[in-house]
Amino acid sequence: MTSTEIIILNYEEVRRRSIKLWTGIPEEFYNWQPDPHAMTMIEMVRHVLEGEHAYHEIIERRGSIGDDYKSPWENRPYTTIADEIAFAQPYRQRYLEMVRSFSEQDLSQIEIVRAALGQRRKLGDFLLRVAYHESVHCGNIITYLRTLDVDRPKIWD
């Protein structure tokens, strides 16, 4: 396997487990949050999906997302988790196509510079951090469900 194939495999596995978890959230808890400063469950799902699109833009621009960035999710009402996943799917496909296009050399030589955050990362490193972001929020949702004493989908298959 190439490095990009391994990265894609990791993305697909993380997303498979995320979807398993997300679709297991009872609808009556979509808007639950542990405190007023935390995201609700449906907001967190959108945050992950929208975040992947933002990361795509950051990668294409090699760092700064720019002042002209407009999220496709802007002003979009929250409905269901299934709707959130379906809406994000075309953006996800374009993101994965971009990742597949990178060569081994690209992964080690392209730099993503986010000066405002003081970050400078090689592309391969940055791509792995995208999957980590999703995984962290998967853990947040598991904790939310545990706090509510709601059955949690078995994502560790």
Image (cartoon, rainbow, N blue to C red):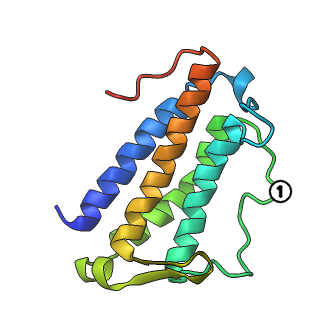
The residue at 44%/45% (across/down) is 15
Q: Looking at the picture, how far across and down is residue 14, in whole percent?
A: 40, 45
Location of the C terminus (image quadrant): top left
Q: Is residue 114 left or right of residue 155?
A: right
Q: In the picture shown, does residue 114 fall above or below 140?
A: below
The residue at 34%/71% (across/down) is 124
Q: Amino acid at mark 1?
A: Asn
Q: Looking at the picture, how far across and down is residue 143, in whole percent?
A: 56, 29
Q: In the picture shown, does residue 106 fall above or below 55?
A: below
Residue 43 falls in which quadrant of the image? top right
The residue at 54%/67% (across/down) is 55
Element at badge 1?
loop
Q: Is residue 24 left or right of residue 1?
A: right
**Foreground pick, 85 / 56:** 56
Which residue is disc 1 drawn over?
75
Q: Looking at the picture, how far across and down is residue 7, in whole percent?
A: 31, 60
